[in-house]
Image: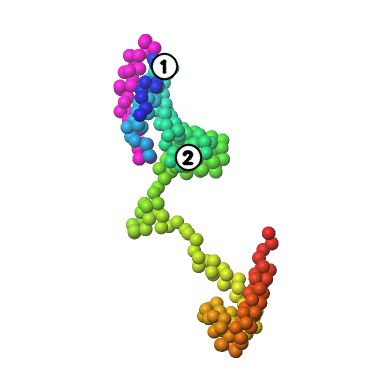
Amino acid sequence: MVRLSLAPEPTRRDATASEQLIHAHIDVARSMASRYRNRGIDLDDLEQVALLGLTKAARRFDPDAGHDFMSFAVPTVRGELRKHFRDHGWTVRPPRRIQDLQARIGRAQAELEASLRRSPRPTEIASHLEVSRDDVVEALTADGCFTPTSLDSAAGEGPATLGDLIGHVDPAMGRAEARMMLAPLVGGLGGRDRRIVRLRFVEELTQQEIATEVGLTQAQVSRILTRILADLRKGLGALAPAA
């Protein structure tokens, strides 16, 4: 749990004014914290972080600078919340440059939304920050690293889950590829050789059963199969691309 005592100590002269600002804006800080709920960090912790940011803002605020307190405090509170997420909230931790860029994007989005009166596009954010659009997109997609969606989550209205949609190695693909490559090679065999291949590898007869079927000895069938397989391997080797 984050404690307010972590904030810098105010001078005696400013203590009363700072406390008044803090108490007057506690609800604002808690409201800002609630925007980050359900991202893997308890709301109580988020509220403590937001109150820490509010305390820092109150103790640093200079009413003579010409700015109202809220315009000074909101970026400070938001910065504390995002810093807390950057340091403690990642379930899957992306590179630090992406974490830092995401914090910059958050600030840029607030500035651009105010000037554009709409949500900025990634290209506009990239131009504002003078970074590439690809980097902005990568940082925006990293937002899901706080709480990745469970593979057990429903993929729609049906019973399927997200895990059901993940691809896997299909053994049939390998068999289909083998048939495609072998078909022209087997087609080039003589009639008796093709029959022996079919009897052995399609009908799965033993060599003795094949010998009876084609009128040869088992030893002859064995030699023929050895020759056929050697020829097929050679043909497959010729089809393979050079390394």
Does the magenta run of residues contain 35? yes
Element on which disc 1 rests = loop
Instruction: State the image coordinates of residue 68 (x, y, percent, origin top left).
Output: 39, 22
First in sequence: mark 2 vs mark 1: 1
Query: Would you say residue 49 is visible in this rendering?
Result: yes
Quarter the N terminus occupies: top left
In which quadrant of the rendered view does residue 28 lie? top left
Relative placement, left or right, of 20 versus 225 is left
Q: Is residue 175 above or below residue 140?
A: below
Residue drawn where x is 33% and y is 21% of the image: 22
Quarter the C terminus occupies: bottom right
Q: Nearer the viewer, residue 12 or 75?
A: 12
In which quadrant of the rendered view does residue 35 lie? top left
Residue drawn where x is 60% and y is 71% of the image: 181
Q: Is residue 182 above or below residue 60?
A: below
Instruction: State the image coordinates of residue 42 (x, y, percent, origin top left).
Output: 34, 35
Residue under label 2, please give it.
93
Magenta stretch, residue numbers: 11-39
Few, some or many residues within 10 Å of mark 2 (<14, 14–19, 20+):
some
Query: Would you say residue 185 is visible in this rendering?
Result: no
Instruction: State the image coordinates of residue 162 (x, y, percent, origin top left).
Output: 40, 54
Q: Amino acid at mark 1?
A: Asp
Few, some or many residues within 10 Å of mark 1 (<14, 14–19, 20+):
some
Element on which disc 2 rests = loop
Residue under label 1, please give it.
62
- For the image, the number of numbered tags is 2
Given this view, does label 2 or label 1 mark the residue nearer the observer? 2
Q: Is residue 224 above or below residue 176?
A: below
Instruction: State the image coordinates of residue 27 (x, y, percent, origin top left).
Output: 30, 28
